[in-house]
């Protein structure tokens, strides 16, 4: 309620509109007071509480044990594999997503609507189903004779499949909103098509591409279902972090699993903060 | 259609919306390809020259600012892609920013500018490449009335200063007559008439041009400007008798609707002073005659002989 009082005082003391301003300030004040509380409660129950549980679980054996488990050779191998594959996929899908989004916005072709719907399929499909599909297509009984099961290529393939919608859908609306006249203006000023792409188009869509890549990376780091079947989860070779955590949990090493999980959480958090920082840097350019 | 645009002129393509003016402008720029016909600049056929090599400055109706670049970098763009030396670019851009009075806003972004300032930035950006032709698409269309007035006068002055051949598109006849020294009236993809503003106003080639450029009324079987008619209390040689139907005061002017005895309904535009002197009221019997000026000039004879 203190909030409400403050808001009222801050309202401009204009004689004519004083009454309506105050009423609006009051309702805004009430919303401002209950809004954050609601959001924080919800966030706590859904996100913060489980995170705290993992942290306490991870440190049950003390910091030394945590460190030993988080940096055990098998943990490090799994984490490194996860991060490297996720980075490859994020970069690759940023480019592929840009291409697909561009074609979807700028080109007209038969079946465009169907293709547009299909892009979201990896979202809708349960990831285990995605894994099964990939295994049947690119596994030992591949109809094309392409068998990548049990290799790192398979991991990248599976991650690329499940994260593609992020890369397309973050960039697509930004491309649709591009002012085509700026491209024509650049051309009339003497810019070649390549220069228009580099100097006009890319700076406008780079923040969206980055956001898409960030989401894809975050999703890839934690991906389990689609990867676990086709990769074979061979320790030190094709075992990603989530699979390693799952096997630790299965073997009843709960604190060990929690320690590796904590590293993943920290990674994701660092990534999100880094993305926010980058976006603020881009926003200085006045891109709405 | 064939349209010659003299070097150094400021020509307005004028006509109703959807009449093909902007398309013509985009064809001149090379942003659009004509189905047939050619575009020549300085006698050289440039129809197949792509826009980036045509050397035209194009200002879009909504300015098409590069949002991620400062005002300075916007203006410098054409020179940067031409890979001119840095100090030459800086000098040229400073000069242009002074010309368009944006020097104090050089480090702002387009989103921090007003509409009129963006318009001037777009103009400086187009002028930076020293275009052979400057093309402006509805340059004042997106601005409010007061800023529009200022910018019209400013553009007129600027054109006198730099004398680059300029073509602008507008649907506002007042704007066209104020800014341009030549008008090309375009309607439904056809060129109706080309000439100086006063030529076209006083000697319209046809009914469409007459009506588009200003008010028109019927008198003696042809179309005239209502301000080229006068009203008298007593009959004179060329007058037509009639009855006043209505007197409308519109600020500085007075509109008098007259039902002539020959059956025509006409209206006369009088100054307030002239109207007050006559003291006209409904049902008064009056004589309507062309003003001496109108007889000496113009449209009436042109049209009636046409």
Image (cartoon, coloured by chain):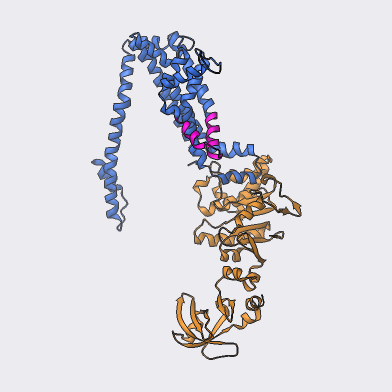
Chain colours: A blue, B orange
Q: Is residue A284 above or below residue A49?
A: below
Residue A72 to residue B112: above or below: above
Q: Depth check: give the residue in front, A185 or A170.
A: A170
User: How far across and down, in percent of the image, does residue B245 sit?
Assistant: 46, 82
Q: Residue visible at 52% across and 29% down?
A: A94
Q: Outermost residue, left direction? A: A1
Quarter occupied by residue B262: bottom right
Residue A113 visible, this orientation: yes
Q: Nearer the viewer, residue A128 or A235?
A: A128
Q: Which range is magenta?
A: A95-120
Report the side of B298 relative to A128 (left or right): right
Q: Position of residue A89 (x, y in %)?
A: 51, 23
Residue at 24% x, 41% y is: A2
Q: Residue A202 vs residue B39: left or right?
A: left
Farthest residue toward the right?
B43
- The answer to whether residue A80 shows anywhere in this view is no
Q: Please say if B230 is above or below B52.
A: below
Q: Position of residue A108 (x, y in %)?
A: 55, 40
Q: In this figure, what is the number of numbered marks?
A: 0
Identify the main secondary structure in magenta. helix
Q: Name the residue located 57 percent from the left edge and 65 percent from the top edge.
A: B173
């Amino acid at each position: 309620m203190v909030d409400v009082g403050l808001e009222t005082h801050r309202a401009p003391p204009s004689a004519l509109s004083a009454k309506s301003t105050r009423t609006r300030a009051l309702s805004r004040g009430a919303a401002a007071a209950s809004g954050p509380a609601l959001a924080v409660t919800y966030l706590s129950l859904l996100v913060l509480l489980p995170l705290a549980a993992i942290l306490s679980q991870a440190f049950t054996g003390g910091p030394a044990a945590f460190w030993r488990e988080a940096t055990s050779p098998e943990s490090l191998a799994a984490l490194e594999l996860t991060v490297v594959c996720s980075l490859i996929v994020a970069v690759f899908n940023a480019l592929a997503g840009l291409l697909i989004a561009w074609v979807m916005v700028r080109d007209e072709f038969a079946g465009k609507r169907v293709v547009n719907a299909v892009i979201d399929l990896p979202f809708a499909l349960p990831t285990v189903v995605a894994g099964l599909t990939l295994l049947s297509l690119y596994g030992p009984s591949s109809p094309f004779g392409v068998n990548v099961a049990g290799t790192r290529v398979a991991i990248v393939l599976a991650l690329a499949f499940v994260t593609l919608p992020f890369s397309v859908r973050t960039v697509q609306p930004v491309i649709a909103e591009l002012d085509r006249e700026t491209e024509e203006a650049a051309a009339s000023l003497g810019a070649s098509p390549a220069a228009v792409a580099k100097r006009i188009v890319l700076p406008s869509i780079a923040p969206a591409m980055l956001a898409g890549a960030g989401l894809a990376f975050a999703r890839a780091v934690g991906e389990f279902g689609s990867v676990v079947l086709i990769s074979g989860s061979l320790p030190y070779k094709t075992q990603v972090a989530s699979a390693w955590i799952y096997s630790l949990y299965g073997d009843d090493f709960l604190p060990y699993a929690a320690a590796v999980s904590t590293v993943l959480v920290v990674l994701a958090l660092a990534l999100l903060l880094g993305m926010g920082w980058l976006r603020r840097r881009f926003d200085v350019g006045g891109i709405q | 259609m064939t349209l010659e645009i003299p070097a150094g002129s400021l020509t307005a393509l004028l006509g109703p919306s959807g009449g093909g003016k902007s398309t013509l402008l985009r064809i001149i720029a090379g942003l659009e390809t004509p189905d047939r016909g050619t575009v020549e600049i300085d006698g050289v056929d440039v129809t197949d020259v792509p826009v980036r090599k045509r050397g035209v400055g194009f200002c879009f109706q909504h300015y098409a600012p590069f949002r991620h670049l400062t005002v300075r970098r916007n203006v410098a763009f054409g020179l940067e892609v031409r890979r001119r030396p840095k100090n030459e670019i800086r000098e040229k851009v400073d000069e242009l920013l002074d010309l368009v009075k944006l020097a104090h806003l050089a480090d702002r972004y387009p989103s921090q500018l007003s509409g009129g300032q963006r318009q001037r930035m777009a103009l400086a950006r187009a002028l930076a490449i020293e275009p052979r032709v400057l093309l402006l698409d509805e340059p004042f269309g997106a601005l409010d009335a007061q800023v529009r007035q200022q910018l019209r006068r400013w553009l007129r002055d600027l054109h006198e200063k730099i004398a680059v051949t300029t073509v602008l598109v507008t649907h506002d006849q007042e704007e066209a007559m104020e800014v341009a020294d030549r008008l090309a009236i375009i309607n439904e993809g056809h060129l109706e008439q080309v000439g100086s503003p006063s030529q076209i106003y006083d000697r319209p080639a046809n009914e469409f041009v007459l009506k588009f450029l200003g008010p028109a009324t019927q008198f003696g079987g042809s179309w005239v400007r209502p301000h080229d008619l006068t009203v008298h209390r007593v009959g004179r040689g060329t007058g037509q008798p009639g009855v006043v139907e209505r007197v409308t005061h519109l600020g500085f002017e007075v509109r008098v609707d007259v039902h002539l005895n020959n059956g025509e309904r006409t209206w006369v535009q009088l100054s307030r002073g002239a109207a007050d002197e006559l003291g006209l009221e409904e049902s008064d019997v009056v004589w309507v005659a062309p003003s001496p000026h109108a007889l000496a000039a113009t449209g009436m004879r042109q049209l009636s002989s046409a």
